[in-house]
Image (cartoon, rainbow, N blue to C red):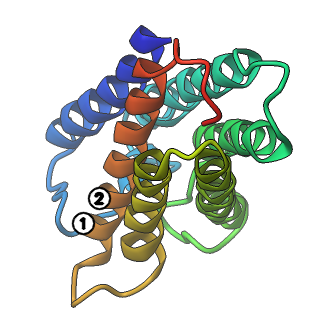
Amino acid sequence: MRIAGLAAGACFVLALAGFGAALEGYDHAAWPVALLGAAGVPRATAFNLLGFVLPGLLAASVAVARRGGLPATAGLPARLGWMLAMLAALAFAAQGLLPLDAAGPDAGRGRLHGVAWGLWGIAFVAAVVALSAAALGARRPWLALGHLGAGALVFLPGWLAVGGLPAPLAQRIACLTWFAWVAWAGWRGRERAAG
């Protein structure tokens, strides 16, 4: 689980850096992540597999392992939280299977890509709220705060205008925060606590 959690983020970052460098004129501060996997962009399929699908599946494996490692006495919030975390990871992976169209990002499958992006964020925020409730029930306020902090750093820049932060940078902050949380969840995986 520790390897999967770290590998998910590493795979995403390396794919983003490598494919971004290989695409002439691509600027991380000006273009969204999904443009690297848009239909008609060179090496789009490879980016979608390495930037979305593989990291999402690795993150899902962490959530499944955490859910499976819960003690029999774990309550509904912990069980629901890890199931929602798995759903968020699968939604992230789905973005690679539903690429944008560079000519019309809001048309065709591009709309479904946007739905997957939205589902990823909503499911993750719901997951951390449930896991925070589980942590508070187990009298672990710092753990609850960690979950909620990650949820806020994914939701606020990813979906709300934050102090004039450009959307492509806000998107990267949201993704990197999520991958940091996945790595943290994988690292803590041997703990048989509530969340």
Picture disc at residue 179: none
Foreground residue, 163 or 83? 83
**Viewer-proximal residue among 33 and 148:** 148
Q: Quadrant of the C terminus?
A: top right
Residue 11 is drawn in which quadrant? Answer: top left
Q: Residue at x 42, y 13 (%)?
A: 2
Name the spot of residue 149 as percent of width and height, x first. Answer: 39, 60
Q: Quadrant of residue 7?
A: top left
Mark 1 neighbour class, 10 Å CA radius: few under 14, some 14 to 19, many 20 or more: some
Which corner quadrant of the image does residue 19 belong to?
top left
Question: Label 2 is placed on what type of residue?
Answer: Ile
Spatial distance from mark 1 to mark 2, Cα to Cα? 6 Å
Q: For this view, does 150 lie left or right of residue 84? A: left
The answer to whether 190 appears left or right of 124 in the picture is left
Above or below: residue 100 compared with residue 20:
below
Q: Is residue 16 above or below residue 141?
A: above
- Taking the spot 56% from the left edge, 57% from the top edge, the residue there is 100
Tag 1: amino acid: Leu
Q: Residues within 10 Å of mark 2 (few under 14, many from 20)?
A: some
For mark 1, give the secondary structure: helix
* Residue for badge 2: 173
Location of residue 30 in the rendering, given as x and y in whole percent from the top left corner? 21, 69
Does residue 2 appear to the left or right of 162 in the view shown?
A: right
Q: CB under 8 Å between callouts 1 and 2? A: yes
User: Is 53 above or below relative to 80?
Assistant: above
Residue for point 30% across, 25% down: 10
Q: Which residue is mark 1?
A: 169
Q: Which element is circle 2 on?
A: helix
Q: Where does residue 51 sit, x and y in percent of width and height?
A: 42, 34
What residue is rendered at 14% in x and 39% in y?
A: 21
Query: Where is residue 153 drawn, in percent x and y?
Result: 37, 64
